Amino acid sequence: MTMKTSTLPAIRVNPELREAAERALRPNETLSKLMETALENTIAQRAADDEFVARALRSSQSARQANQYIPAAEVLSKLDGLISAAQKKKNAVL
């Protein structure tokens, strides 16, 4: 069984934004389809953001309860090492 579609409220935008949106259209894409895709992407991104924050809060709570923390300097040092290794790998390929 297919569900009926519904409409969203019309939005008012300045002419420059509408023109930019029309220039961004792909072949055979409508302005409505662009807006639908943008809305879907925004909803997905916000869900991912919310899940990221929830995981971070759970991790923080777990670390607090276990009293186990990794010093920021250690994390940054490891990240610097990863960046250096990636840059060396990239330079070796070039």
Image (cartoon, rainbow, N blue to C red):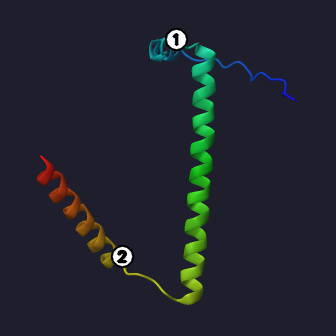
Lower position in the chain sequence, tag 2 or tag 1: 1
Is 47 positioned to the left or the right of 14 in the image? right
**Mark 2: which amino acid?**
Ala
Tell me how far mark 2 sits from mark 1, CA to CA: 47 Å
Quadrant of the rendered structure where residue 54 is?
A: bottom right
**Mark 1: which amino acid?**
Pro
Q: Secondary structure at mark 2?
A: helix
The foreground one among 41 and 13 is 41
Is 20 positioned to the left or the right of 93 in the image? right
Residue 69, horizontal then vertical, whole percent: 45, 83
Residue at 50 percent across and 12 percent down: it is 22
Is 83 positioned to the left or the right of 59 in the image? left
Q: Nearer the viewer, mark 2 or mark 1?
A: 2
The foreground one among 12 and 70 is 70
Reading the image, the residue beneath label 1 is 15
The answer to whether residue 14 is above or below residue 48 is above
Reading the image, the residue beneath label 2 is 72
Residue at 24 percent across and 61 percent down: it is 83
Residue 81, horizontal then vertical, whole percent: 23, 69
Residue at 58 percent across and 13 percent down: it is 30
Residue at 56 percent across and 74 percent down: it is 59
Single out the residue that lies furthest toward the bottom. 67
Q: Secondary structure at mark 1?
A: helix
* Numbered badge on residue 30: none
Residue 43, horizontal then vertical, whole percent: 63, 40
